[in-house]
Each structure stands twice: as C-alpha cells, then as structure tokens.
Image (cartoon, helix red, strand yellow):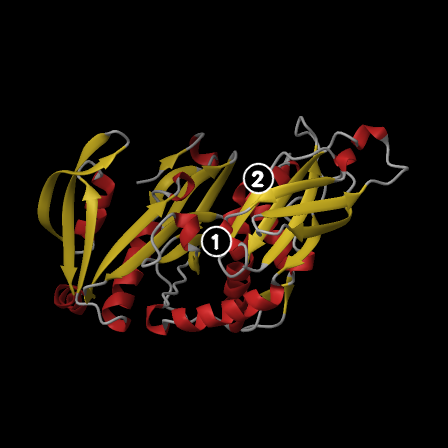
Amino acid sequence: MGKLMNGIFGGFHGRIGNLVGYTLKGKHIVRKIGISTKPLTPARKANCQKMKVVNEILSPSLPVIRSGFRLAIVGTDKNEYNEAVSYNKLNALQGEYPNISLDYTKVLVSMGDLPVAVNPVINQNVDGTEIEFSWEVPADLSYQYDNDRAMLMIYFPALKVSCYHLIGSKRAEGTDSIRIDAAHAGERMEAYISFIKDDGKAVSNSVYAGSLNAGKATESTVETASKMETPDLDFGFSGSDFETISAPNQELGLAKSWNQYFLKNKANDEIIGDFAFKLRQNNQHIAEININISPTGQHKGYAKETVSAALSFLFKNAGVNRIVKTVNAKDEAAIALLRNLGFREEGYFIENVFIDGKWINEYQFALLKSEWGLMNLNS
C-alpha cells in the first residue's frame, strides 16, 4: 500500500501495483518494478560490460573515490561513487563490446581544482614491499600549495584490489611512499597521485603515475582468467529497474568460493545491493544464496526479483537440485520473502552464530528443484 506525501499533489511512499515511490535526496522518485523477460540488446550488453570494467577498479578504491570526488558533487543529488563511474565510463574505456577494457592512463580517482602532480614517477624498493612516488615541485608554484597533502593509490589489476594512502607527504617535499603486501610485490600495479588540502576543502584531479610489473602480471591475469572460467555459473540478470554486475570477492568480504554480484540501478548507476551464491564443495548439487539490499533500495521488490531469477538460473543452468538459506530468526522480512518464494523451514538452530558480541538464533530454509518446478508449472 502506498502513502501520499504532502497530499494529492505530492509524491507517494510505498508500493501501488507495479510502482514504488520513495524519496531520494529530497526528490520524490517513482519507479516500475517487475521481472523483464526481454533479451538484452547489444547496447545494453555493452553497457553492462562497461559497468563491470569500471567497477573493477573503483569498487576496491571506495575510500579514495569518496575523498577524491566529494567536492565534485557538492550542490547536486549525486554521490561520489556514481560520479566517478560516470566520468570513467565516458573517458577511461577503450575497445568495443565484447572487448572493452580500461585505459589506465585516463582513469580519474579524484576530481578538483588544485594544481595536479607534475611528472610523477614510481619506483619499487629492493624487497618489493614499498613503492616510492616522486614528483616535480615547480619553482614558480605559489606557496599556498606547498602544504597540500599527497593522496596515493595503487591498483592491482590481476587481484582486483587497491591500497592507498589518503593523507601523505606535503607537496613541497616532492616524494612519498606507500607500503604494500609482500604477497603483491610481483603483481602488476597501476599508480595514481592527487593532492588534497589539510582541511579537505580542495582537491586536485588525480594523475596517472605509472605501471610496474606490467608484462609479468598480464600473463598472470590471462592464466588466472582461464583457470576461473565457469560459464555455467555466470549469472546475469536484468530486471526492469536494475541489473547485476560481477563484484570482486574482496569488496563483499566473502570467500572466493562465492560467485558475487552487485545490484546496479539502471537509471542512475547507483549500487543498491549485492547478491551471491556458491555450490557446496562436497556436493555441487546443493547451493547456498545470500542477498543484501541497501537502505535506499529496500521495499521495492529488488530482493524478490533477484532471488527469483537466481532460482531459475541455478535450477536450470547450474545443475542444482537443492538451494539452502540460513537467516537470523528475528529477520522477519527475509523469512517472509523465503516463504513467499516457496522455501520450507527445515530447522531452528539455537545460538548458531556469534555476531557483534552475542549469540544469534537462526532458521534454515530450503527449496528443491521439484518443488520449484511444481510451483512454476501451476503459476
């Protein structure tokens, strides 16, 4: 049921039929929900790949993006991450679908009016665990910029992770360094530098500082991709209001056995949640699922759309016979969703998991392929 806001001439909040209304940064938004059965057009497929490629570098670099694009969105209803996505989709991609890739030299992780770093270079120390950045300090540079602080970032393409230093040396010092994990010392690195005021009231555009171990890591990336290719588990879904894009394991904090995806709003490229599934190592016919929806994306049917599509995919394409989901016994919304989709309650586990200093009771729900097929046959 929807609720009118500010009378009949205002927006509404809630659901009316296949429409949902909500408020986003002071604006009344109305969207249509439901599952689209239309195949993706070539343009949509290209856009999905563009989003995936850009998110691979931006997602693990979120703290840098928040600092670097914060001032670029002042006075708008945009957010830092979406602004970075929009810029890099337009300016930092090369190639045509299905061979779209990043041009690392054109990526921006910071946007602002301060003078940029001049002729930055990077070097790796002997043991490989420290990357030194250096840059020129022009003799005619105004003294007001001497105390700007360096913001450094290194991205590892093969690993899809980033490390960063948000408040580093002063601009006038001309050098700074960042430590990396010893296990990453031989990996390909792409480096970026920008400057930010101590009070955060001004920032520069980032500048590409160079690459290390590019040849070796390129071979490693190809080899890793070949080993990880699992086309039967490539879940892709486009609803009427959002679509799924692959997410790096490190971003969602789940083990590598999980297949992970972000839910992206089609209208504004906002990430509104995440979804993941995995096949049990000792029984590939049993799958587990997990879904989270951000506060701005809740109560719009996104979870139901995604899980419904995932059930169809896992039962039809992945050879799964049984899907299991464990939920907090107090999570009434999740329990209602599972029951609505036909899941059966199989067990109640007292103090089954320890979270935030306390033991949590959980329910286990499950759905068989035969049960799912019967429901869809009768629907």
Quadrant where the C terminus is found in the figure: bottom left
Q: Residue 66 carries which label?
A: 2
Horizontal side of residue 281 vs 128, given as left or right: left
In front of the other: 274 or 371 = 274
- In this figure, which residue is indicated by the disc labeled 1? 183
To which quarter of the image does residue 278 belong? Answer: bottom left
The image position of residue 103, as x and y in percent, is 65, 62
Quadrant where the N terminus is found in the figure: top left
The residue positioned 51% from the left and 54% from the top of the image is: 184
The image position of residue 109, as x and y in percent, is 63, 47
Q: Is residue 6 visible in this depiction of the protein?
A: yes
The reply to whether callout 1 and callout 2 are in contact (CB within 8 Å) is no
Q: How far apart are marks 1 and 2 (CA)?
A: 27 Å
Looking at the image, residue 338 lies above or below residue 138: below
Residue with the most extreme right position: 140
- Residue type (three-letter) at the residue carrying disc 2: Arg
The image position of residue 273, as x and y in percent, is 40, 48
To which quarter of the image does residue 171 belong? Answer: top right
